[in-house]
Structure formats: structure tokens, C-alpha cells
Amino acid sequence: MFICCRAMMRIKPTHSAKSTRLLRQRGVALLTMLLIAALATTLILAMIGRQSRLQAEISAQFQQDQIAEYDRGAEYFAMAALKADSDDGNKSDHPGEYWAQPFPAFPVPGGMIMPTLRDAQARFNLNSLIKNNQVDNISLGFYRQLLNQLAIPAELADSLVDWLDADSLPTGSAGAEDDYYLRQNPAYRCANRSLSTFAELRLVKGYNSELLRQLAPYVTVLPSSARTLNVNFLSPGLLEAMVPGLSPGSALELLQRRPIDGWETVAAFLDNPVFASASPEVKTSLQQLLSIDSHYFELYTRIRFVSRERLQWSLLSRQDGQLKMIASERNPLWVPDNEAAALGAIEADKAN
């Protein structure tokens, strides 16, 4: 019996070791199953997340594409209005014409299109400072007068001339060529070509965002050949800069007396008592700076679609009755007052 008990004692540990190994195997198997389940869950969640992101990307791309289509539609609409004006044989452009009237907001599926068409030659073209690779002295003289009127140092005209002209010789005491721009951080070169956009002006020596906001209502960027300003769209501020000594009240009064169909000739505009005391030099420069027709127009199109909103600027050219879009920019630096006013009216209507 003693021997049997000792044998049983030897057998018992052996049975316990097998059970332990079995339990361990089961535990490993369970842990493996849990890891597999966790991995599968992670993969499924990753696939769902990837699919959601893909759907969001597809939706965003669809919205962008639709906004682009709406923008093209606004451009076609604006060009059709300008083409109709040209086909009517009108020799002058003025605020009383159809294309110059405020356009209504156009509701579209999923959003709204709000276009604003403006005469681009109602402001001074900065690129006109250089003509045929030479400084245009009449344009330069006017720009200096405009800077003085706005309490901006007139010497800034020199650095802009250097940015536009093709040579590497600084103009005046405030001019700047490569030797100045290569010392900036980061360094860059003088463009020596026409401005591509109004925002590019920030790269020119002496100009910054605050100065651009001050200049924006009075200047623009067009092909260098567009020197003249349409007298029928002139602002009082520009007229004051053109005629030294002209008071703000006289400038405003003259423009308020503009005929319903605009002045038919520049001579008719200059045949006004306010110009009686102007010097022959001033009258000569006015005859060369002014016109009664326009060849460039700006279209500001604000589009709201689903959850997105975009403002697009387009520059339209009309030459011999032919219309084309020659430049565009998203979210331009400056938004005209009437476009901002139209947006405010729309927001007020929505609130009511």
C-alpha cells in the first residue's frame, strides 16, 4: 500500500503538467484569435475610413468641378452682354448701358452665382508706365500726381518703373534693380516685365499690402497698350489727380453732371468751365489719357455651392467685337465696392 501511494504521488504531477500545457495551448489559441479579431477589426475600420475619405474627396472634387462650370457660365454671360453692346454699334461705353447695370444673383441647383461686371479702364493701368520699352512720361507724370494726392511718396513710381522696364539701371533715387532684390530674404530678381497681377505689386520695393489697399480703388493691371481711362467711368479721385488744383467738390460736381448716355467725345468732356484755367500741358495730357470707350472689363464672380464658396476674378478683352478671357485669379486681393454691397444685400435678404 505504501508503494502504491508513492506511485500515485508520482503520477499526479505528471497529470498536472499535461493540464497546464493544455491550458496554456488553449490560452495561446484564444489570444491568437483575439489578435486576429482585433487585426480584422482594424483592417475593416481602416477600409471604412479610407472609403469615407475617398467619398469626401470625390464630393469635394465634384463641388470644385461644378463651381468651375458655374464660373465659366458667368464668363459666357458677361461676354454675351458685352458682345451685344458691341453689335449695337455703340461708340462709347457708359454706366447707362445694360452690361454696366448691377446683375441679379442667379440661383442654381445647390447654390447661387453673383456676378459683377466692371469697366477695367475706369482705373489707371500701372503697366502703361512703360510703352515700347520706354517710359511713358505722360503716364508717369499722372501716376506721380496720384501718389501725391494719396499722401504716398511719389518716389515709389521709380521702383515700379524699374520693375517694369527691361534694363538694369535704377531710376532716380528710389529705383531698384537686381542688386536690391538679391539682398532680400528670401532673395529674388527684378521682374523687368509687365505686372501679371495686382498682388505682384507687393514684391516691388516700397510697396506692401497696406499700400496696395490704399491704391486699389484707383489703379489696375492691364496689358501695357491700355493707357487711356474711360471718362464716363472716372472717379472723382482720379480726376483730381489729373487736374492739379481741382477741388474734390468741383470734381464730384462735374461727374454728377455726366449725361445719361455719357460724354460722346473727350472734347465734350473738356469743354467744361472747370478746365478753363487748366494749363495747355494739362489739357494735352488729358486728351491723351482719356477716352470714351473701353476694351477691357473685369468680372467678379462669387459662387456658393453646397458647402463651398469662391470668388473668381476674370479679365475680359473686347477688340473689334471679339471677346475673350485673357486672365483670371481666385480670391483676388481687392474686391470692388459694388460687389461687396451686393453680397451684403443678399445676406440681409437671407437673414429676413
Image: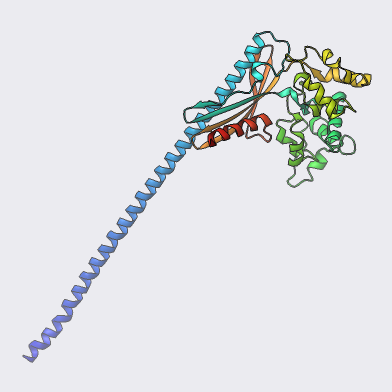
| 211, above or below 319, in the image | below
Residue found 8% across the figure and 91% down from its top: 2
Residue 139 image point, x, y percent: 84, 25
Residue 260: % across, % down: 73, 15
Residue 10 location, quadrant: bottom left
Total labels drawn: 0
Picture quarter containing residue 154?
top right
Could you tell whether 345 is left or right of 65 in the image?
Answer: right
Q: Nearer the viewer, residue 77 or 42?
A: 77
* Drawn side of residue 92 relative to residue 168, left or right: left
Q: Is residue 185 visible?
A: yes
Q: 330 or 184: which is nearer to us?
A: 330
Percent across and percent down for residue 47 are: 37, 46
Query: What residue is drawn where x is 25% and y is 67%?
Result: 27
Residue depicted at 29% across the width and 60% down the height: 34
Residue farthest to the bottom?
Answer: 2
Q: Quadrant of the N terminus?
A: bottom left
Residue extending farthest to the front is: 352
Residue 130 position within the rendered picture, expressed as x and y whole percent measured from the top left: 81, 26
Residue 135 visible, this angle: no
Q: How is the image coloured?
A: rainbow
Above or below: residue 268 compared with residue 184: above
